[in-house]
């Protein structure tokens, strides 16, 4: 005696087949739909299964597919027993069924059922029939064909959707899943169907999901408006729709938003760094104004004192400290990508060799391995920033290895396709890569998240400024490049920096910086300079410096005052020194007005911000030069000389 | 309906056939309620499915009048026509009552 399973949602069919086969000595199990049948298959192993096609909760076609994938049951003899078969050609072989019987009068159906069972036994459950049995009645054949086509159409639509769709029955069990749902849940159909929807999710998320399933009535909208939820390593947006008119069932729509979240995180992070950058640049600008006043006053005092004066050395110390402070504000501006940017062709290998030599001398206990690509492309960039970048990377690696350690530095030409494992999508084109790997203490993910923020430091108070990696970030962004960081506590850290290889025809190969061209034969009378700055203290000290340089000075605190003075004294004025950032009428507007009054006017721009941006633009349309605050007496003199000397701009 | 002949044809005991017919009466009565409900809810798909259910079971027992009445409802509903099925339902109920009476006499 062997077991036969009959699956049909009509009690009459189940009862008839059970009675018929019971009389023939078979042990008969019955189930009302595919879901109930899958439950039965967990504890019994029927040799023959009769299955209806159209059923709620896992239809016959899906059931056949699943059974053929179950190691325990895949060799059973499957018979499709369906009313649909009486009305349309059922491609039962595509369902991997062995035979198909069209439903009809019991008398005829019974004969076919018994015949099929005999065939199954005779063939050791292996026979596969070609024809549908019991097709004498062709009642309404065309009608169902249309219905089947319509069903097929929906199947195709559902299968090609990128959203995962799950149908959940009143008990919270999954009875339908489209292809996307299987992919998103990373579960095969045979595991997904009949499993409990809630159990897909982690324990702590289940309560929330359960509350969406409890909503049974809907006005067409979802009961969970785009709830975000984790499933394995994926971020999902979940919407649950109760099925209208069928209060027991729900449809769950799963959208994989992992990628979208990743991009949003990336955007948020760069926006944050950007806003910190703006703040940092603002602070640097104000400090530069303060430093201008300190440096100017100290310069003037130094000029008036003999070198033997007891305070002379103190003034030199003040000037040295101003230079250190200027480097800090310069780094801040660099981070905000508002630093000076002098474009040259850069040989990265050369910069690394020089930097490693300097660094190696200070950290003899670290063993440094350098692997530089001899074919490394030169690229366009700011040599000063790139040097800073390399040095900061080395210093950072050194700090991560307080005792001994290995430091590996590598350069290589790469294409954008090789920039992997990163959270950004690099622009197409060739890049040079510098990789710096240390065997130091490593970082946890929280630290790694914040290392590029200015003033973030893990070092002891007083040891790090928190600006090193921030300026690396600024320099890389300024060059249009990318940074990738890999780190693990106790294993070390690898920074990979990718800088795009850009070359414009006009860029010169790196050369020696120009020699100091300070003119030693100063003329006695040098004319009048119109000085425009909204900071009183800056005006005062700069006026004094210009007097020292033997210029007459007209000082204006704002734009309109400047224009009034220029109109009045334009014949005397040889140069206008113009602050760019001023309240009310800004430097750009004043510049335009001056140019309208006198197209030949010479204007030296001046700012606590850098040349990038507005100053660059004004130079492009005729301003004569730019000087960065804080400036020394000597550098101001130089800038003025460059403009006023014969042939100067 | 002749239970004895049907039992012979199906190769079953009369008692078995009686039980099958009882199941048919019960499920069809339920389906008729669903038909009523589907019409009042103006739900064409539910109308079609319930009629289809009745048609199939009646066909199994070769009760052609019931099967045809159910088919008429099914076809209309399939084309989206929601028509009051009161007349065919009435016809089916009458036939069911006859069978029920027959069963109780013979039983």
Image (cartoon, rainbow, N blue to C red):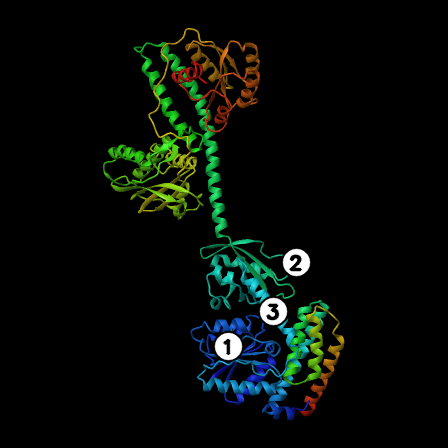
Give the residue number, with chain letter if any, for mark 1: A97
Mark 1 residue element? loop
Disc number placed over residue A304 in the picture, else none: none
Q: Quadrant of residue A55?
A: bottom right
**Identity of the residue furthest to the top in this view:** A524
Same subunit, labels 2 and 3: the answer reads yes
Q: If you read the primary sequence from the N terminus, does the residue marked by circle 1 or circle 3 appear first?
A: 1
Q: Are marks 1 and 2 in contact (CB under 8 Å)?
A: no
Q: If you read the primary sequence from the N terminus, does the residue marked by circle 2 or circle 3 appear first?
A: 3
Q: CA distance from mark 1 to mark 3?
A: 20 Å
Give the residue number, with chain letter if any, for mark 2: A219
Residue A21 visible in the snapshot? no
**Identity of the residue furthest to the left in this view:** A365
Q: Position of residue A489 (x, y in %)?
A: 33, 47
Q: Are marks 1 and 3 in contact (CB under 8 Å)?
A: no
Q: CA distance from mark 1 to mark 2?
A: 41 Å
Mark 2 residue element? loop
The chain identifier of the residue carrying mark 2 reads: A
Question: Comparing marks 2 and 3, which lies closer to the viewer?
Answer: 3
Same subunit, labels 1 and 2: the answer reads yes
């Amino acid at each position: 005696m062997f077991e036969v399973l009959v699956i049909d949602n009509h009690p009459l069919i189940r009862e008839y087949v059970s009675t018929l086969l019971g009389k023939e000595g078979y042990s008969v199990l019955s189930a009302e739909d595919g879901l109930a049948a899958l439950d039965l298959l967990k504890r019994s192993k029927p040799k023959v299964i009769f299955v209806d096609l159209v059923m709620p909760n896992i239809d016959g076609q899906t059931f056949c597919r699943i059974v053929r994938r179950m190691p325990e049951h895949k060799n059973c003899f499957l018979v499709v027993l369906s009313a649909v078969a009486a009305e349309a050609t059922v491609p039962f072989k595509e369902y991997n069924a062995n035979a198909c019987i069209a439903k009809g009068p019991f008398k005829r159906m019974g004969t076919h059922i018994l015949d099929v069972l005999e065939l199954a036994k005779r063939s050791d459950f292996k026979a596969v029939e070609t024809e549908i049995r019991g097709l004498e009645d062709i009642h309404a054949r065309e009608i169902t064909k249309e219905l089947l086509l319509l069903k097929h159409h929906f199947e195709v639509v559902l299968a090609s959707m990128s959203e995962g769709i799950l149908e959940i029955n009143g008990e919270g069990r999954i009875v339908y899943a489209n292809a996307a749902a299987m992919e998103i849940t990373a579960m095969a159909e045979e595991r997904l169907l009949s499993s409990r929807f809630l159990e897909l999710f982690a324990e702590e998320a289940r309560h929330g999901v359960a509350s969406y399933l409890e909503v049974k009535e809907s006005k067409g909208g979802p009961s969970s408006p785009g709830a975000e939820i984790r499933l394995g390593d994926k971020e999902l947006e979940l919407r649950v729709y109760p099925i209208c008119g069928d209060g027991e069932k729900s449809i769950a729509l799963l959208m994989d938003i992992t990628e979208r979240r990743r991009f949003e995180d990336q955007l948020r992070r760069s926006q944050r760094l950007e806003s910190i950058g703006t703040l940092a640049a603002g602070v640097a600008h104000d400090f530069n104004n303060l430093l201008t006043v300190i440096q100017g006053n100290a310069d003037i005092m130094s000029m008036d004192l003999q070198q033997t004066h007891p305070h002379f050395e103190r003034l030199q110390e003040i000037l040295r400290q101003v230079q250190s402070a200027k480097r800090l504000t310069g780094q801040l501006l660099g981070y905000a990508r508002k630093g000076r940017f002098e474009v040259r062709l850069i040989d990265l290998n050369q910069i690394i060799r020089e930097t490693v030599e300097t660094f190696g001398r200070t950290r003899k206990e670290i063993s440094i391995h350098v692997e530089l690509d001899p074919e490394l492309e030169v690229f366009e960039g700011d040599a000063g920033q790139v040097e800073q970048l390399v040095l900061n990377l080395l210093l950072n690696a050194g700090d991560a290895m307080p005792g001994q350690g290995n430091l590996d530095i590598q350069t290589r030409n790469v294409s954008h396709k090789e920039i992997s494992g990163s959270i950004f999508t690099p622009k197409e084109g060739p890049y040079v890569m510098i990789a710096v790997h240390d065997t130091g203490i490593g970082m946890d993910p929280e630290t790694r998240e914040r290392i590029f923020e200015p003033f973030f430091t893990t070092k002891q108070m007083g040891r790090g400024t928190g600006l090193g990696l921030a300026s690396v970030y600024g320099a890389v962004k300024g060059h249009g490049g990318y940074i990738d960081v890999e780190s693990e506590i106790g294993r070390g850290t690898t920074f990979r920096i990718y800088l795009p290889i850009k070359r414009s025809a006009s860029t010169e190969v790196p050369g020696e910086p120009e020699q100091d061209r300070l003119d030693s034969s100063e003329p006695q009378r040098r004319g009048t300079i119109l000085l425009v700055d909204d900071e009183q203290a800056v005006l005062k000290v700069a006026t004094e410096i210009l007097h020292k340089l033997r210029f007459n000075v007209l000082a204006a605190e704002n734009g309109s005052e400047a224009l009034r003075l220029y109109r009045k004294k334009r014949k005397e004025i040889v140069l206008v020194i113009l602050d760019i950032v001023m309240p009310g009428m800004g430097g750009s507007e004043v510049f335009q007005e001056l140019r309208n009054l006198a197209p030949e006017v010479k204007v030296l721009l001046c700012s606590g911000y850098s040349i990038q941006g507005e100053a660059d633009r004004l130079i492009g349309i005729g301003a004569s030069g730019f000087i960065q605050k804080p400036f020394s007496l000597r550098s101001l003199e130089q800038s003025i000389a460059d403009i006023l000397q014969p042939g100067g701009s | 309906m002749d239970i004895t002949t049907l039992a012979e044809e199906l190769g079953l005991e009369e008692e078995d056939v009686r039980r099958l017919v009882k199941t048919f009466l019960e499920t069809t009565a339920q389906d008729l309620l669903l038909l009523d409900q589907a019409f009042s809810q103006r739900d064409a798909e539910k109308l079609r499915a319930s009629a289809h259910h009745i048609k199939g079971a009646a066909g199994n027992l070769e009760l052609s009048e019931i099967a045809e009445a159910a088919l008429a409802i099914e076809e209309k509903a399939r084309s989206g026509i929601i028509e009051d099925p009161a007349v065919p339902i009435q016809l089916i109920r009458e036939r069911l009552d006859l069978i029920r009476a027959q069963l109780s006499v013979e039983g």
